[in-house]
Amino acid sequence: MIPDQDLTSGVIVASSVNSPVDGWLVVYKDPNNFTSGQLVGYAPVHQGVNNDVKITIDTAKAGDLPTLWAVLQADMGNPGRFEWGWKGQAYDDAPIVQDGHNIVTGFGTAAAQDAA
């Protein structure tokens, strides 16, 4: 679960993440385009429950979007190295699919709160 976040510090916190495998919680700008060009941050997660997962966000890249999207991705390539096209890496750490769908959740940002 990720409550609405203030991006000004450059760090967001996912209060609780339950992952079926070791992997990554990856934040994107677009819920329909999980590519490295849309990626604004990521953090490792372990199989099971992870509390207070801190994710460093590229605030310049995130801009003033009212919603960002967190996706669980498996650590399938080199263990402990995020590989999803980020900084020239291969696309090995794919989104986790459960019941035919990616595990994804949206959350509001300070931009959305400021606009209200």
Image: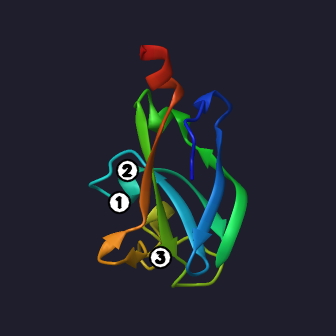
- In the drawing, what numbered circle is on residue 35? 1
- Residue 91 image offset from top left, x and y in percent: 40, 75
Q: Earlier in the sequence, mark 2 or mark 3?
A: 2
Q: Quadrant of the C terminus?
A: top left
Asked whether residue 46 is in view, the answer is no
Pointer 2 with pointer 1, Cβ within 8 A? yes
Q: What residue type is labelled 2?
A: Gln
Q: Which amino acid does label 1 sit on?
A: Thr
Q: Earlier in the sequence, mark 3 or mark 1?
A: 1
Asked whether residue 2 is in view, the answer is yes
User: Which element is circle 2 on?
Assistant: helix
* Alpha carbons under labels 2 and 1: distance apart: 6 Å
Q: How many labels does the image show?
A: 3
* Alpha carbons under labels 2 and 3: distance apart: 15 Å
Say whether residue 90 is left or right of residue 82.
Answer: left
User: Which element is circle 1 on?
Assistant: loop
Dot 3 alpha-carbon crowd within 10 angstroms: few under 14, some 14 to 19, many 20 or more: many
Q: With respect to residue 31, does 93 lie above or below?
A: below
Dot 2 alpha-carbon crowd within 10 angstroms: few under 14, some 14 to 19, many 20 or more: some
Q: In this orientation, which residue lies closer to the viewer: 30 or 20?
A: 20
- In the drawing, what numbered circle is on residue 44? none
- Residue 78 image offset from top left, x and y in percent: 58, 84
Q: In this orientation, which residue lies closer to the viewer: 87 or 33?
A: 33
- In the drawing, what numbered circle is on residue 93? 3
Q: What residue lies at 61% left-to-right and 62% top-to-bottom?
A: 17
Q: What residue type is labelled 3?
A: Asp
Disc 2 marks which residue?
A: 38
* Alpha carbons under labels 3 and 1: distance apart: 11 Å
Q: In this orientation, which residue lies closer to the viewer: 53 or 77?
A: 53
